[in-house]
Image: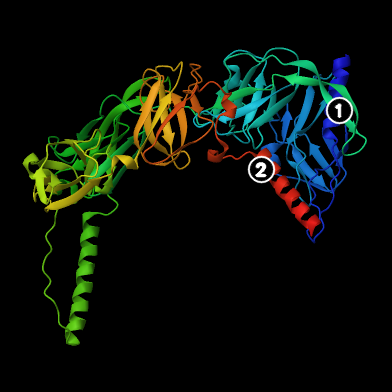
């Protein structure tokens, strides 16, 4: 009972803070203090409450910022409460019926601010009970985005006393809170017992996970709230230099206070046809919500079945483009075909489904001809005008058409890169003898051995590989008509010069990870969160050669399924998202330097790893401290003057 009374006194004391003062217009002292809570009706920790109207009173005019996002009533209210400000008062009207013998909390987070300066009354909440006892336990923690460890602002965090897996998907939370701008949360008014903890980006505001596009998080272990009696040192001073007394003051600390929930959005599990489009006459594309292990079956209805098209597909067949070969076919306004594909039925099973599709291009052949005729007539009119003026009219010769080809080279090539060659349509054939790689020796160009191949999963992308040497000049020469596109066009002769950087332009990073797991994959981040390089950890090491000088951050994910990309989780099978870690500092590299860095990704708690400089959601607490420091500096400058 003594601990309980101390807890109540501690909570009330926390809500009573220093009064604010109004800043003078001539650059005088800033108002940095939040509003002071004077009282409420019903009062904090009141018992036997029947009324659904709660009034709060403060020492100055106040306002509410983003009430719908920040203010949370627990147990959760299906009908959102009505919240109004009136001068120095805030009135909360609860529309749902109050449950008997239940502890209620109204948590404002940092929504209450003073009217003039906007100083927030942070972590402000009140408890009352409809019964003869009140539950005062609390738990706290942080919610992070599982993919990048960003603090998640405004996401619901809830507890279920029903420990079954189905509770999260079928019942509203028992107790609920919402994260602040730093991703922190506190759930109050909890009764003794064990709970399951969840986070939910509640799209339809029913406090349960019933939509697959809602971001969620869950803890594997149960949460059992408890308290500890702790002390803090309270110092009183005779003056600014002399201590009067130091005494130990007891207080109740609520635990656990370090819960970390990693939130993710599930990958789609339902396969269906999402979009079909025909952006150009000669091609159309089909898109699915999920990939498959095979192509769908396409049965033409108004064009030939055999050898009618070339297929350009993604690795898992979730997007497929069909390039039509015959102009007599694709000049048609409508292409009709039956498409048979795997579809997820209402029972969650993949079953065959056939749709009949009729595709019309954005511009029909007739429309294209009409536009071309219009341009021809406009050009003819302009020609006639110039002839009447006596202008010299140059002879217009028809321009030959060529297959478009782009060679990605340059005079500052990295030694770990290859030459990329791209086309704007599928290639029907090419002659390897017409593709040349040459090295400059003195003033002569000497043929070099090379490998030319199609890039993986790139119908119109190829690459040329050579034995590159630093500071050596090369050139790629492609003979005319070495490539012939799907529609019969050949390329004109093309040449691209290449020169590779010297070795002293690079740095090398040797990264050592003790106790690494088989799936560990390291990503070097440059320019925020942009992945510059990725390397799988082998025998506890990941080495990055030919690294351009600059500032890098390091991210690591545990690639449990070995597919080379980060994968999200799935609640139904209790599969968490793949673990992500951040090196807490940064790596600054210089030319011709080698760097060795040892890193244990689990050495720091996960919520303390991500460097502040690459966070998108900046810490509001740190920003406030920085602003206060700036204000103090300005005050000192003013005092000196």
Q: Would residue 530 appear left or right of 300 to someone viewing this image?
A: right
Above or below residue 365? Residue 254 is above
Q: Position of residue 201 (x, y in %)?
A: 58, 32
Tag in front: 2 or 1: 1
Counting residues from the start of the chain, the first of labels 2 and 1 encountered is 1
Q: Would residue 343 appear left or right of 221 to someone viewing this image?
A: left
Q: Secondary structure at mark 2?
A: helix
Q: Position of residue 585 (x, y in %)?
A: 53, 33
Tell me how the rendering is colored: rainbow
Categorize mark 1 by other alpha carbons within 10 Å: few (<14), some (14-19), many (20+): few
Residue ID for mark 2 = 623
- Name the outermost residue toward the bottom: 389
| Viewer-side residue, 278 vs 19 | 19
Q: Secondary structure at mark 1?
A: strand
Residue ID for mark 1 = 234
Q: Would residue 7 appear left or right of 384 to someone viewing this image?
A: right
**Residue at 84% across, 46% down:** 20
């Amino acid at each position: 009972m003594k601990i309980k009374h101390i807890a109540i006194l501690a909570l009330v004391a926390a809500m009573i803070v220093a009064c604010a003062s109004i800043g003078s217009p001539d650059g005088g002292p800033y108002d940095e203090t939040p509003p002071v809570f004077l009282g409420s009706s019903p009062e904090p920790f009141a018992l036997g409450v029947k009324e659904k109207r709660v009034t709060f009173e403060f020492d100055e005019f106040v306002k509410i910022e983003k009430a719908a996002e920040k203010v949370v009533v627990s147990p959760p209210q299906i009908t959102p409460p009505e919240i109004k400000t009136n001068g120095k008062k805030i009135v909360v009207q609860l529309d749902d019926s109050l449950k008997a013998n239940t502890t209620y909390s109204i948590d404002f987070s940092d929504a209450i601010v003073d009217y003039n300066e906007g100083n927030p009354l942070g972590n402000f909440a009140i408890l009352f009970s409809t019964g003869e006892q009140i539950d005062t336990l609390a738990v706290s923690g942080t919610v992070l985005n599982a993919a990048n460890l960003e603090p998640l602002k405004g996401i619901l965090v809830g507890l279920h006393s029903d420990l079954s897996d189905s509770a999260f998907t079928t019942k509203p939370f028992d107790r609920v809170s919402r994260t602040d701008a730093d991703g922190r949360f506190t759930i109050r008014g909890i009764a003794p017992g064990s709970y399951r903890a969840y986070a939910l980006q509640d799209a339809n505001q029913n406090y349960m996970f019933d939509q697959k596009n809602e971001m969620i998080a869950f803890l594997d272990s149960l949460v059992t709230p408890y308290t500890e009696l702790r002390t803090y040192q309270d110092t009183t001073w005779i003056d600014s230099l002399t201590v009067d007394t130091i005494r130990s003051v007891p207080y109740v600390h609520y635990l656990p206070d370090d819960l970390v929930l990693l939130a993710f959005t599930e990958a789609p599990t339902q396969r269906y046809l999402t979009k079909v489009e025909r952006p150009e006459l000669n091609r159309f594309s089909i898109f699915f919500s999920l990939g498959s292990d095979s192509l769908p079956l396409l049965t033409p209805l108004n064009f030939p079945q055999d050898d009618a098209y070339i297929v350009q597909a993604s690795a898992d067949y979730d997007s497929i483009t069909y390039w039509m070969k015959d102009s007599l076919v694709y000049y048609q306004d409508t292409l009709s075909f039956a498409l048979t594909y795997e579809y997820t039925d209402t029972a969650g099973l993949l079953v065959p489904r056939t749709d009949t599709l009729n595709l019309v291009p954005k511009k029909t052949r007739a429309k294209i001809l009409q536009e071309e005729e219009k341009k021809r007539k406009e050009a003819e009119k302009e020609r006639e005008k110039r002839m009447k003026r006596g202008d010299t009219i140059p002879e217009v010769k028809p321009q030959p058409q060529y297959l478009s080809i782009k060679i990605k080279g340059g005079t500052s090539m990295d030694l770990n890169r290859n030459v990329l060659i791209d086309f704007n349509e599928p290639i029907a054939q090419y002659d390897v003898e017409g593709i040349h790689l040459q090295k400059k020796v003195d003033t002569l160009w000497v043929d070099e051995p090379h490998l030319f191949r199609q890039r993986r999963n790139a119908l119109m992308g190829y690459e040329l590989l050579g034995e590159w040497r630093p500071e050596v000049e090369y050139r790629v020469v492609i003979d005319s008509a070495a490539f012939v596109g799907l529609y019969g066009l050949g390329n004109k002769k093309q040449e691209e010069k290449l020169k590779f950087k010297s070795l002293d332009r690079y740095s090398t990073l040797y990264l050592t990870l003790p106790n690494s797991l088989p799936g560990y994959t390291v990503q070097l981040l440059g320019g925020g969160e942009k992945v510059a390089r990725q390397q799988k950890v082998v025998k506890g090491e990941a080495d990055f050669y030919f690294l351009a000088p600059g500032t890098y951050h390091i991210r690591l994910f545990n690639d449990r399924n070995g597919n080379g990309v980060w994968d999200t989780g799935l609640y139904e099978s209790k599969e968490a998202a793949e673990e992500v870690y951040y090196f807490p500092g940064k790596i600054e590299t210089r030319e011709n330097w080698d760097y060795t860095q040892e890193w244990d990704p689990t050495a720091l708690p996960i919520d303390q790893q991500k460097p502040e400089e690459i966070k998108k959601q900046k810490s509001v607490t740190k920003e406030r401290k920085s602003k206060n420091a700036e204000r103090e500096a300005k005050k000192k400058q003013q005092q000196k003057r």
